[in-house]
Amino acid sequence: MPDDFERRRILVVDDEERMVRFIRMNLEHDGFQVAEAFNGKQALQKLRDTTPDLILLDVMMPDIDGFEVLETVREGGNTVPVIMLTAKGEEDDRVRGLELGADDYITKPFSPREMVSRVKAVIRRTEGASGSMHDLIEVDDRLKIDFDRREVWLEGKLVKLRPTEYRLLYHLVQNAGWVVTHDQILVKVWGYEYRDEPHYVRLYINYLRQKLEKDPANPKYILTERGVGYRFVDYKRQKT
């Protein structure tokens, strides 16, 4: 997808006006349109009035913190990409945001280049989760996947996947029967900027297993190749 972000609208949510101005200036320099909110209530109202392409959401806010805003957004079924902004570097905070449905996080202080790069990477990832597998894939009697329609069916029921989960599944199924390394997954699903973030892979593999596997602790579809990566079951060979 070309680097054309002129029509992309970013909602920036932070209670520090200086931080919002800093973010706005750098995003507009790269062609983004920017909307502002200075607390959680304003952010939720902006979301009711407009549809941004991505939200930059600060964690520490006085009225409704970023985690609560994110939880409200996801409970309402909104799949807009969200990048959390946090002054804390603890893994627990990062994991909590990802578990609530954030697509990424940036730890303050951050450089303008890092922020813009992450915003572009998340937009590319969420808008580019499509592929060349056109036929309905019948993994077995239980699991069916239609990548053209972006649908996953489990025991006859539609499974709702977030964009990153869908993109991860696509790359695993595209290489069914072959081991895909941690580094390959990071670059293909998240982008080259994320090659040093292995916890993303573990976390999202777990999400997929929770949604698709009958027994996530003993997976039959997404198999671990210890110390190397993951392999989707070779469903074609199973049928021959």
Image: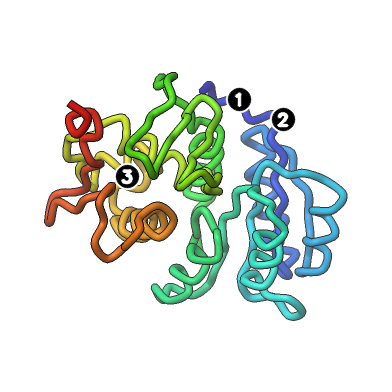
Q: Are marks 1 and 2 in contact (CB under 8 Å)?
A: yes
Dot 1 or dot 3: first in sequence order is: 1
Q: Which residue is mark 3?
A: 186
Q: Where in the figure is residue 56, as x and y percent of width and height?
A: 63, 55
Q: Where in the figure is residue 180, as x and y percent of width and height?
A: 21, 40
Please tell me which residue is depicted at 33% across the width and 36% down the height of the picture: 139
Please tell me which residue is depicted at 39% across the width and 42% down the height of the picture: 143
Mark 1 Cα within 10 Å, few/some/many (few <14, many 20+)?
few
Q: Where in the figure is residue 67, as x and y percent of width and height?
A: 62, 71
Residue 183: image quadrant is top left
Q: CA distance from mark 1 to mark 3?
A: 23 Å
Seen from the viewer's position, the closer of residues 64 and 151 is 151
Q: CA distance from mark 1 to mark 2?
A: 8 Å
Q: Are marks 1 and 3 in contact (CB under 8 Å)?
A: no
Q: Which residue is mark 2?
A: 7
Determine the secondary structure under disc 1. loop
Kindly identify the amino acid type of the residue bearing the numbered disc 3.
Answer: Leu
